[in-house]
Image (spheres, rainbow, N blue to C red):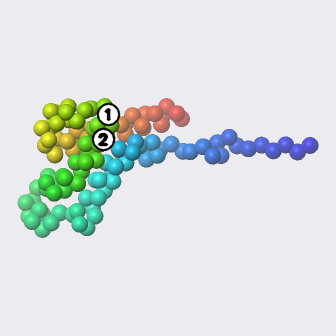
Amino acid sequence: MLTLTSCSNESSAINTVETMKTPQMEKFDKAFKSLGDPQNRPTEEEKKRNTSELSDRRKALLVPASKELILSTGVTEAELTRKTGGDMSQIIVWATEIYIQKSDEIRKNIKSEK
């Protein structure tokens, strides 16, 4: 008699923070990474301002993904506008806080799975 067995975890996916990110978190990541693309790097004029704050041109690259991440939490467009006044910096900061919170939640879930 021949008996074949298989490991049950053979095809199970390994959960990492990267694999558990929501699509909105991934877009937010990509938007930040796009700041390093040659066409999105600071111009000479932007560098001369000698500030750590992003230029409006570069902030505008982050705002769509930032808004999408904020709205994915159940916040309405009206609430987003009321809370930020449409200020790009406030939108990006709020989205960053959400991103960090969601990443922390994912890490906790991964730890509890082990």
Q: Residue at x 12, y 63 (%)?
A: 47
Coordinates of residue 45 in the picture (x, y in percent): 9, 65
Taking the image as drawn, is residue 13 in sight? yes
Give the residue pinned by disc 1.
Answer: 73
Return the mark for residue 110: none
Where is residue 91 shown, x and y percent of the image? 20, 42
- Rounded to the nearest angstrom, the CA distance separating label 1 from label 2 is 7 Å
Q: Type of residue at label 2?
A: Leu
Residue farthest along the right direction in this orientation: 1
Kindly identify the residue that appears in the image at 19 percent across and 56 percent down. Answer: 58
- The answer to which quarter of the image holds residue 92 is top left
Question: Taking 23 as reference, is 41 above or below it?
Answer: below
Circle 1 sits in a helix, a strand or a loop, which is it?
A: loop
**Image quadrant containing the N terminus:** top right
Q: Nearer the viewer, residue 30 or 53?
A: 30
Q: Which label was assigned to residue 69?
A: 2
